[in-house]
Structure formats: structure tokens, C-alpha cells
Amino acid sequence: MTGCIALIGAGLGDPELLTVKGLRKIKHADVIVYDRLINPAILNSCKATCEKIYVGKKPDYHPVPQEKIEEIMIEKAKQDLDVVRLKSGDPYVFGRGGEEGAALKQAGIPFEVIPGITSSIGGLAYAGIPITHRDLAADFHVYTGHLNNSEREIDWEAAAKVGGTLVFLMGMSDLKKITEQLMIHGKDKNTPAAIIQWASRKQQKTVVGTLETIFEKACVAKLQPPSLIVIGEVVTRRRELNFFEERPLYSVSIAVPYTKRKRMATRLTDLGAEIIELPPSSIEFFDTTIDFSKPQQVVFTDPLSVEMFIRAMKTQEIDWRKLADWYFISVGHHTGSVLEKAGIRPDMNYPDLTEYLQRLEENTDSLFLGDSLTLAELKNNESPIEKLLTHEEKITVDIPDLWQKADLMYFPNPKAASLFLTALSEEELATVAQKKVIVMGQKTKAVFDDYQLAVVQTAEPTFDQVVEKIKEEMKR
């Protein structure tokens, strides 16, 4: 038996531009062989057991030869593993996907190709430049900018006269030659031109000029690869079509805790921010034995505590109908929703544990289900409380240094803050101390206070307040 290999185009740097099918394959892959320009956020989607193999190349520096990359894929597939070959852009647009597909075919390895958004089209769009336009360009032509091999020299006379939009990928090192050759062969020196660096990422920078001036302007702006070169009248539409660089949080990178729902991350992304997700936590579940012989008041502190309660019911063969006299309390809206999906509407729902404890009568017996971080909040309560540890949540993997490159960090609740801070070394905590950190709520701030770390707290626990604080901090 051999595994199947998927050649997947990851598209531009924005991870949300990955196709639905590509994401599905990544989530189920046993091995991912990936390139340099892949956004690390995409790799967060793979399963915990997935082997990630980096084979990235830099201009004029290829530490892993192409032949070796193909050998790695074939070797892994022969171990009956599902392999993803993850490439930026599209595999078949100057991505050597055709060579890799041919090598797999020759080796008898089944494969499929999942296209991605090529930067030659999508990258221009993110800079407000349409690659075609009814009034300006009826065609477009995409060239590789690698001009070292004289046998593959561009037909400059044809390129200069063809019209339409010209796009050069991987051409920054030969920008001067590209512009000079086009002018030598008859291209108007006043033809609009632009260079887009890191299209769709927070580092995106666009420089506009003419065929004659664009090289000098690129040097002044210190543009570096990866960059796109676009030449043609469509560049003139940038002023009216530029949407990405005008968003309120454009060029801001924000490190946020990993969540499955990603509501906050999505809203920040829509405002132009680049999101760096912290690593997801790992969860250890414990055997949960509950006394179902008499009615109790049960407090579910998070969705996982609901799951563990239901597991205990199934293990002990308990039917919901036997719990008619029980009193169920959920903490947090999402916990209440999970409980309702299980078939039980909570008798009471509280937004957070603090509010519930303030209303808890001294003589009320309660069974609290949750993890150690949550149950620790009950240590000073004088009521007759029984605590049952249902699960333990930790960030156990080494935290990549990506968060250290973020402009600021955001933590919506004390649990997310505790999970992150307890996983850090002294050196990493010192890095956090130098960061701009925004938190929601006094209890979240208190977690950072325990580490003697200064943070900015939102005046109100709302999304609008978070955005306003981000804007304020980025102006400082």
C-alpha cells in the first residue's frame, strides 16, 4: 500500500485564501512538506501527530535540492502515509509542481493537484491593481524573473510589443535588467509600473512609478523579495481600487490565543490585522466518577466539563430522565449552548464564575466540574463545595517565536492568559514584558499582575473597545 500525495497551492500569505479542499487535506495529512513562504498559521491546522518537513528555498540558496524533495515525498508515501506537498501560490505557476507530479507518476505514487491563488493575480488584487480591465488590458502575460539561464532568456521584443499587463515573479534581483530590456525593445518609458512586496501580509508595501522610474523607487523604498513586478495601464486603477492598505488595522500583527471558533480573530482580520495564533493547548481527560444516587446542584465551568459529565453518565448507564430533580448551572454562554445541545437547558447561566460565586449562598452544596485553573478560583469560598477535576489543559509544546514578532498581544480571558504565561521560560516572560498587551476584564489583568507584567485593560468587554485600544497603542 502507498499513501496519496496532494500537491496543494496555499495561495498568497493570507491563510484564509487557502481553498476549502486544501484545508481539508492539511487537517488529515500524516506528513506536510512545505516551502519557505508558507504562512505558519496554516500549519496550525494540521493534527498533532503530523510530521512537518521544511524544504524552503531562498534566492540563490537551496539547502534541500529539488531531487531530495521528491525523494522525501516518495519515501513517505511508500510508508502508506498521506502526504501534503504545500507550496505558496499555485503549484503549477513557477512552482515546479509539474516536475514533482512527473516524478511521482514515474514512481507509481498516486497524487492529486489542488490549485491555489497565484500571486500573479491575487497579489495584484491586494494592491488594488486588476490584472485585466475592459478599458485598459484585455490580456496578461506572466514571466519568471529568474534570468540567469541564457537558454531561457525572455523574448524581450515580443514582451515589449505584446501589450496588456506584464507580471514578473521572482524578479527583484533582475529588476533593472527587466525595465531596461523592455525600454530598449520599444516599451514606452512612461508605462505605469508597480512593485508589491509581501502581498496580502502585514508587511505588504506597494511602490508605484513608471517603467523608467520604478527601479530607482524600489531602491529608495528598500524593497526585497518576495515581490511582484507589474507593468501596464492597469496600475493606474490602484488609487480607486486599493482596499487592503486602507483598512484601519492594516500592517498590524496581533498574537491571540488559539480558539476553534475564531470569532475575534476573524473580526480583527477583516479590519486588516494579521493574526498570529498561539499554539493550541493539549487536553488530558481524567476518569470522572459521579454519585448519581441523589440529586445535586452541578456547576459546569466550561464546555469540556459538560462532555466529561455526559461520559460519566454513559459509563454508569444513567438516563437524563433520572436527573429531573437535579439543578444545572452553566458558566459562560458557550458552556450553556453545549449543555443545551446535549438535551438539557441549564436552570441558570452566569457570564463568569465570579458572578456566580457572589450569588452563591453559604449553605448551598455544589459540585463544580472543570480544570485545575478554574477550580483554583474556589479556594477561598466558604460554601460546602465539592470540586471534581474533569480535565487538564496545558500548552505543552514549545511555543514558536512567531508571537515574539507580533506588534501586540490580546487576551480575552484569564484562562487564556494563564495557559500562555505558565508555558513560558524566564527569558520569554521578559519578552512579554516588552510587548504591548491588551486584555479584556480585571481578572485577566490580575493574571498578568501576578507576573508583574504591565498590560492595557479595555474599559468595557466589547470588540469595539478592543479595536480602539489597539489603535491607541499603535499610535504610541
Image: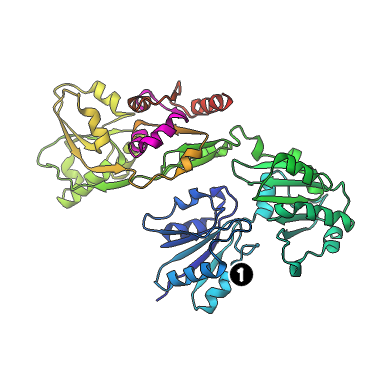
Frontmost residue, 129 versus 279: 279
* Image quadrant containing the C terminus: top right
The reply to whether residue 411 is in sight is no
Number of numbered discs on residues: 1
Which secondary structure class fits the magenta region best? helix
On screen, residue 232 versus residue 37, left or right, reads right
Determine whether, in the image, residue 463 is placed left or right of residue 236: left
Is residue 115 visible in the rendered image? The answer is: yes
Asked which secondary structure carries label 1, the reply is helix
Instruction: Residue at 18%, 45% (x, y): give it.
Output: 288
Give the quarter of the image for residue 373: top left
Relative depth, front residue between 138 and 233: 233
Residue 35 place in picture, x, y as percent: 54, 57
Look at 21% across and 23% down and name the residue there.
Answer: 360
Q: Residue furthest left?
A: 293
**Residue 151 rendering spot, x and y as whole percentages:** 75, 70
Residue 236 spot, x, y in % from top left:
80, 43
Q: How is the image coloured?
A: rainbow
**Which class describes the residues within 10 Å of circle 1: few (<14), some (14-19), or many (20+)?**
some
Q: Which residues are magenta?
A: 417-444
- In the image, residue 87 above or below residue 447: below
Q: Is residue 261 above or below residue 180?
A: above
Left or right position of 360 against 52: left
In this figure, which residue is indicated by the disc labeled 1?
98
Queried whether the magenta region covers residue 419, the answer comes back as yes
Residue 5 horizontal/vertical position (percent): 49, 68
Q: Assign the N terminus to one quadrant of the image.
A: bottom left
